[in-house]
Image: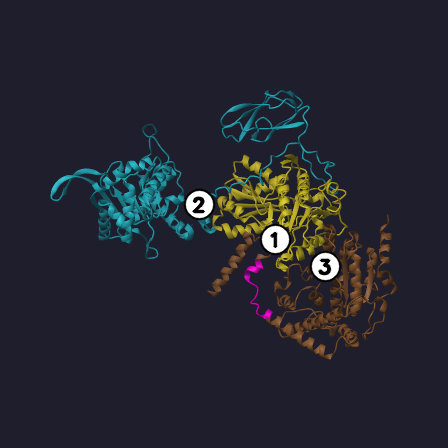
Chain colours: A yellow, B brown, C cyan
Amino acid sequence: MAVMNIVQAVNSALDAKLADDENVLVFGEDAGYEGGVFRVTEGLQKKYGDKRVFDTPLAESVIIGAGIGMAANGLRPVCEMQFSGFMYPAFNQIISHVGRMRLRSRGTYSVPMVIRAPYGGGIRALEHHSESAEAIYGHIPGIKVVIPSTPYDAKGLLISAIEDNDPVIFLEPKKIYRAIKQEVPEELYRIKIGKAKVLQEGTQLTVVAYGAMIRTVQQALQHAKKEGLSIELIDLRTIYPLDKETVMDSVKKTGRLLVVHEAVRKFGVAAELIALANEEAFLHLEAPPARVTGFDTVVPLPKGEDFYFPTADRIYEAIRKTVDF
Amino acid sequence: MATPKQAQDIAMKDFMFKDFDPLQGKRLEIMNINGEIVAQKWMPKISDEKIVEAYKTMLYARIGDLKAVSYQRQGRLYTLPTNIGQEAAAVGSAMAIEKNDWMVPAYRELGAWLVKGATMRHYFYYFGGSEEGSRFPEGTRLLPVSVPISSQLTHAAGIGHSINYKGEKDVVITYFGDGGSSQGDFHEGLNWAAVFNCPVIFFCNNNGYAISLPRKKQTKARTIAQKAIAYEIPGIQIDGNDFFAVYRATSEAARYAREGHGPVLIEAVTYRRGAHTTSDDPTKYRSAEEEKEWEQKDPLLRLRKYLESKNLWDEKSEQDHTEESTADIESQFKEYEQFEGTPLEDIFKYQLEEMPDSLKSQMVDMRNFINRKEG
Amino acid sequence: MLYIFKFPDIGEGITEGKILEWFVKKGQQINEGDPVVKVETDKVVADIPSPRTGIVKNVFGKVGEMINVEDALVEIEIEGEEAEQVEKVPIEEAGFGVVGTIEDAKTDAFLPATGEGFEDVAVAEKTDVSRKVLATPVARKMAKDLGIDINSIIRTGPAKRVMKADIQRAFEAKQAGPKVGVAAASRIPEPLAERTEIEELTQIRKTIAARMVESRFTAPHTTTFEEVEISRLINVRNEKKDQLAEQGVKLTYMPFIIKAVALSLKRHPKLNCRLDMQKSRVIYNKYYNIGFALDTPDGLIVPVINDADKKSIIELANELNEKAARGRDRKLTLDELRDSTFSVTNYGSVAGIYGVPIINYPDVAILGIGRILRKPIVKDDVIVPGNVLPLSLSVDHRIVDGADAARFIRDLMVLLADPVAMLVM
């Protein structure tokens, strides 16, 4: 066991898989020699050589496109996008090919690729460095989308993602890259993709969140606990395939649902969960399912940022409202 | 230790590319429109049997293409592209690579796919609306059609990258058009392949048009081949309707790549004698004279003349092969028309390796809906 | 090396505690065994001793705060021991990230590993999530507006959903009830404190009261009384009683009675139906769920044995005992108290020969079992001692006529008099 933050846990996962499977390659802009702008891949090129861990030209579309070709010939590319906001130039490759190759060729070719990117906001950054596009990726058929919220989960999920024979977009919440430390095993272990986790049991309301929001929700829940409320918290962990069963069982138990995400409100993950609650738990509902989200706007620059991201008190207010309905 | 430029020069010394600098207006032409060899020194080493086989394949491909267009006009296939006029570029390049090499197509290389191991049956399935048309036999190493223009060039670079990584000796040939050379992925794919020394032949079918846009409005560069200079790789422009030029240049490029010198850009100047697709009307943007002019330069015409001049072919062979090919193609089409349609399950089961519950329940709901309607 | 000492599980299944007092502070030298902190749990107040010797580097938690087992308590710098951790990956120029400010963890406190991905976590027994009362939001609002507790009313919708009609009926009954109650209440004088003791009505008592009123004032009851000689049944029971007791099965007469009832109902569906006056129809139940009245410290409840016709005497005996035990502990679920098609009340086990039992509405009949009487009977024209079981059968006379009741009870008596007949049926 070692104590790690998310950066170190991701590094540890990559290290473990590079050692375990010679078909695994790790590459991206500045990911090789320098070890990545967040130092996530630090030390890996030194350990495994520049044929396995390497720097690419500044060209996102080909980073993913070349990965597709490598996968066709049996490799397992782990492509790093420097920031999730820079995935957009590769979007054509992602939506047109990564998610479709298996279907298009009836299984002859598939894309066991991981696309890793730091994502999410709240870090006082320039434009384009605070993006949360998980709903857009979740909307693409043929792609899995995973978002861990702790170091332990990050390592276990990333290992599963690399071993998955389907493409996985692995979004790393950079706001909490170094904010949380946890004991993490040094060896290989897997956390199943598609399995949400009940972090806290309760009876009055089910709160679903993921990524950096988990920590913010937990702050709100501390306040709720003092007020005598019994709240169930679920960390979604995988956006697609969504663990409908865990979430709906919980909603059926509590009768109330609140979804929290920092991403844009319209057409987001909360909308999907609430639609599912409608389909699967309608007769169990005692209050309208609610959501606390970012606005339908672009993330403001740092001076306006604090308005945007859901805070513990905004979340608590929504909890209170839903429980009191 | 040689610098990259020195290494490049050394490599180039053994290859023909140094004699065909596109910026000097050089273009490889071996056989003229009358089927006469005008540049004997560049004639490839290729047996007569193989040349006849090439012609037969080109003829078969032409018949297949025309039949497909005809079926489309009868409402028995959906919108499809036309290949007529580009057979030499397709067949000549495909025959110049090995069985184990990879082919990453765009969508207008019917002749090449047939050489690689696809069949007209696949073609009919694909343009008849079924993904079964992209299910090629194991080990074919042919990727499916890529609709987003030039996006496949990055895939080719990736396959080439993996070949280097695994220490394999194969090469990759990938196709795109003159329009495709404007896309960002053309730049990104060539750049990556050059930086990482990937064994990739970037084969441009410059057929004069990107739907309606003529080549000279596509790029200011006077040739596409010269763009190779930007990536520090060899680029060569060839007469794409000259089977021998195509075969020779591609063989050379394959040798170059296989020996580990990196990628090559070939620009095959040809002509899209048909429409962009069966939904396109070329009379809107080009003249009948121009089409007539290119009819004279047709690739089958001149290769046939060459073969006949060598007594390797005659009218009877032409008739026999046309009949055989037509019968074969028709029977494959008949086979395709037995197809009952995509089974419901196939829509779902190939999306991911394992169907998640949420997807399964969609399939089950649809299955139940169908049963209710039928029951 | 920095040793992190976490709040240990000091046994007895405690999961958290409140910090009462710190015995150490930052920078202090501490020896193994010295008390670190005083913690109060819901079982004990305990001083937690230090497992190591060293210097306290950090202390987590304030006096009065709650901490969980496995939370970090103190960090102790232990001299001389080599860090067993892997060489720290030399990352992290503080908050390095090219763009933006990445928050650094403020302390060295860390979360424990979750253990996921290693043990084969046994799939937790899925709790039955369908125990919640099902109702549309519209119905819930209606109930709320009318002041009806949606959890306690009778549900007639698909999958036991609460329908608006159910709420309406409950509301009307509530209106009707208090009318009687109101009249009665106005006749109850204001209690004098020194001469009376007042006890609030429990929820269960209120429910019983409402149900009794509903049943008695909806269904016109008529009761048939009969006697059956059960010496043979007594012998059978006595024969088997001890043997089964050894296997842990307590055998009374009730399993036999319930079995006989279920079999008789099969021949007399009129007593196993429901009457729907609103829709002018009779619903014949093709299943046989027998409720049995159970006296608990909180009052009368009626647990239900489903499909009694399909169960053996032993199975019935076990289920009766098990449900009775849980019923007394108020551990039965709402589902186990619903959907009877016929009920049996065994007041005779305490005292009482004949009674006029109140039907467990919306059943249409209920069988009362009286005290077994040792009394003279006439057998082959001779007076001999016999064992007589008194039966009192109340029926809803809107749908069950006297003759129906009589035919049912006649067949029932045949089975009770001769238990072997139950095998043959």
Q: Chain of mark 1?
A: A
Q: Label 2: which residue? A: C131
Front label number (3 vs 2): 3
> How far across and down, in percent of the image, does residue A237 sit?
60, 45
Location of mark 3 (residue): B101
Label 3 packing within 10 angstroms: few (<14), some (14-19), many (20+): some
- Residue B179 position by quadrant: bottom right
For badge 3, the amino acid type reads Asp
Residue drawn at (74%, 78%), measured in percent from left and top?
B314
Labelled disc at residue B338? none
Amino acid type at mark 2 = Arg
Is residue A227 covered in magenta? no
Same chain for labels 1 and 3? Say yes or no.
no
Dot 3: what SS?
Answer: loop
**Marks 3 & 2 on one chain:** no
Q: Is residue C307 above or below residue B130?
A: above
Which of labels 1 and 3 is toward the front? 3
Dot 1: element: loop
Q: Judge left or right: residue C385 versus residue A157.
A: left
Q: Which mark is residue A267?
A: 1
- Residue C163 showing in the rendered view: no
The x and y percentages for residue A272 are: 57, 51
Start-end of magenta stretch: B335-348
What's the chain of the residue with tag 2? C
Report how far apart the C-alphas of labels 3 and 2 lie in the structure: 63 Å
x and y percent of residue A67 in the render?
Answer: 70, 52
Toward the right, the furthest residue is B24
**Chain designation of label 3:** B
For the residues beneath circles 2 and 1, the answer to whether they share a chain is no
Residue flagged by tag 1: what amino acid is it? Phe
